[in-house]
Amino acid sequence: MPLITVKVFKDELNKNQSRELIEKITSSVTEVTSEKLRDVTSVIIEEIKDGQWGVGGNALELDDVKAMITEQ
């Protein structure tokens, strides 16, 4: 039974985005494994507070993620 955990910043995803992410991850897992696992595939989205996530020695915040999305 697959168990997938996704960590995002608190309030990074709205309800619709969370639902879509869960659906797409579940579909990806069943494509690779077996459609029979769809009903037993669990996806957990954990929210992390600003400043509690770091990359390359630097603490990140939700505003940093938003800036990455809007960069061209």
Image (spheres, rainbow, N blue to C red):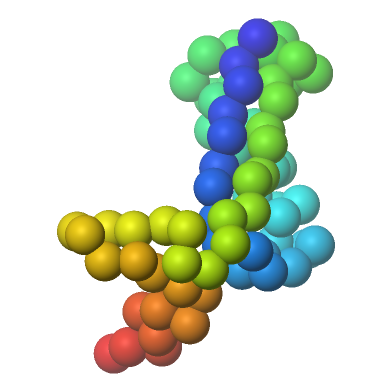
Q: Decide: is 17 above or below 4.
A: below
Residue at 58 percent across and 55 percent down: it is 48
Q: Is residue 30 left or right of residue 69?
A: right
Identify which residue is drawn at 74% across, 68% down.
14
| Residue located 75% across and 15% down the image | 40
Percent across and percent down for residue 41 are: 69, 21
Picture quarter with the C terminus: bottom left
Q: Between 54 and 68, which is closer to the camera in this rendering?
A: 54
Percent of width and height locating residue 65 = 43, 74
| Identity of the residue drawn at 53% across and 68% down | 50
Whether 48 is drawn above or below 70: the answer is above
Horizontal side of 29 relative to 46 (left or right) equals: left
Decide if residue 72 is on the left or right side of residue 12: left
**Would you say residue 24 is visible in this rendering?**
no
Where 33 sits versus 9, above or below? Answer: above
Give the vertical position of 39 relative to 54 (above or below).
Answer: above
**x%, y% of residue 9?**
56, 62
Q: Quadrant of the N terminus?
A: top right
